[in-house]
Amino acid sequence: MTIELQGEDGQVAAIADLAMALLEGIGRLDFQERIMTALKQRVAFDASLVLLYRRGFAPKILFNDWRTDRGLSNIQQYLQGYYRMDPFYRLTLEDNIDGVHQLSQLDAGFDDSDYYREFYQYSGLQDEINVLVSLDADTKFAISLARRSTRPAFTSEDLKFLRTATPLLVKAIVRHYRDLRPGEQEGEPLLQSALAQAVRNFGRSVLTGRECQVVQLILRGHSVKAAAIKLGIAPATVKLHRRNLYAKLDVTSQASLFSLFLDAVCSADNAFDDPLAGYLNRRAKLTGDVMRA
């Protein structure tokens, strides 16, 4: 039971950290660095890349932490043509498949491929996960996380976390590149203040006071047990409030709650009203949906 609770605490906190990192990073020059820093809090990896794939062009490196045996020369060889043999590149641009994919599961004959023999084996890496996101039909965003041959492969828990986090990553990445307006670092204190205000105000137009307290703690990364201690109530009561607020907000999990928060904050007119209210009003006009009271 203790291990299970620790696992829950860790995943909730990691998703919360990632959501905040994405919100803070949208439109900023260090967007990719913020993503990788947040992911590394939960998934251990030795080398990482963020790439922009464009049909008909060599990939563009947006972030590079590629600590491999051949280092920079390995990346240069990749950009000069080996990328065309990369199973992840083929998967997203040729097969048009997005999502989270693990190299060891993607290609059972990878060790016998020309790509492995001519290029990959010299990197010193033995397993890799890519998160693939379509920006449009010909432009793809790829987050590559890799482990050295001296370490074990990625686990099912690593994949599970990344798949849980992918809807948040997709929304933030698409928003960032659709609406790219790199900000100045001096705006950081104002941004932090606005985010804190958004968390405090989120849902107050549709939730009860206690439900608002519970949703704020969830957004800050607290588990059920931690929220119960914070509020001085039983964990079962927190679960009841969580179930009720999930029903009101039409979400089914913590990940979908963070996704809703991300959407609402990104489209908010200001930081002083409930960001959810304006978002729901705009959605209702488009779809005719009515939020349950």
Image (cartoon, helix red, strand yellow):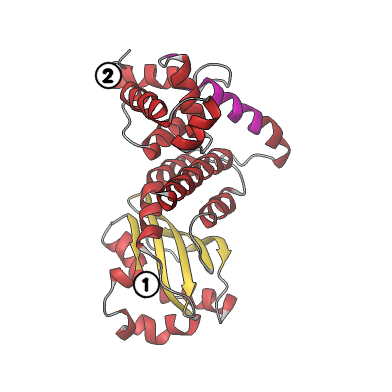
When the figure is inspected, residue 68 is found, relative to residue 43, above or below; the finding is below
In the structure shown, which secondary structural element does the residue marked by tag 1 occupy? loop
At which x and y percent is residue 23? 53, 38
Crowd rating for badge 1 (residues with CA inside 10 Å; few <14, some 14–19, many 20+):
some
- Judge left or right: residue 97 versus residue 274: left
Q: Quadrant of residue 192?
A: top right
Name the outermost residue toward the right. 186
Give the amino acid type for the residue marked by disc 2 in the picture. Answer: Asp
Disc 2 target residue: 289
When the figure is inspected, residue 49 is found, relative to residue 164, above or below; the finding is below
Residue at 39 percent of width and 40 percent of height: 255
- Taking depth in this image into account, of 52 and 237 the one nearest to the observer is 237
At which x and y percent is residue 56? 38, 63
At which x and y percent is residue 244? 34, 22
- Taking depth in this image into account, of 254 and 145 the one nearest to the observer is 254
Disc 1 target residue: 86
Residue at 61 percent of width and 42 percent of height: 182
Is residue 268 in the magenta section? no
- Taking depth in this image into account, of 205 and 176 the one nearest to the observer is 205
